[in-house]
Image: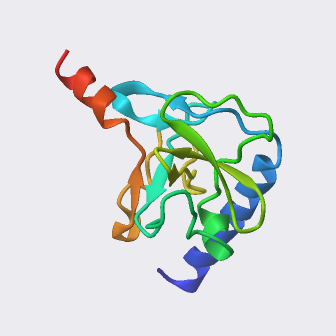
Amino acid sequence: MDKRTGWWWIAAGMLAMAAGAVAQTMPRHGGQGRLVDGEGRALYVYDADAVPGQSACNGPCAVVWPPLEAPAAASVPQGFGVIVRADGRRQWSWHDHPLYRYAGDATPADTRGDGLNGNWHLAVDAAASDRALHP
């Protein structure tokens, strides 16, 4: 990635974080077992989040991969959870895996972050995905 492209993604991430300052809605199940945010945008998990309930994506990482923030009084549906990040903010999780959005996704149909750097993957409910494929 050249420097100009890298700076664009950082700027896009900053804009996404500014937009994320508005209360984000609860994650939910989308089609084919995918997990999405309240706007229907793809959610992701990060392989480096090796310690259950802890996020390894901070600083510049969290600019490009904004954490899906949870309100203080969140009602937590089954399978989902809320972790507390190192900076004290609350973040939604799926079975103790922190959930993120990708700044490069422009529409709810986008999944541009899936497979990036070999460490980022769409967040899925494997059981729901299996039911969708094999009713």
- Tally the numbered discs: 0
Is residue 27 shown above or below 131?
below
43 vs 75, nearest the viewer:
75
Please give left or right for residue 100 compared with residue 71 in the image.
Answer: left
Regarding residue 109, the answer to whether it shows in the image is yes
Specify the quadrant of the image occupied by residue 133. top left
Residue 76 image position (x, y, % from top left): 63, 31
Regarding residue 8, the answer to whether it shows in the image is no
Residue 115 image position (x, y, % from top left): 35, 60
Residue 58 image position (x, y, % from top left): 65, 71
Residue at 58%, 77% (x, y): give it: 6
85 vs 107, nearest the viewer:
85
114 vs 119, nearest the viewer:
119
131 vs 86, nearest the viewer:
86
Farthest-out residue, top: 135
Residue at 26%, 22% (x, y): give it: 132
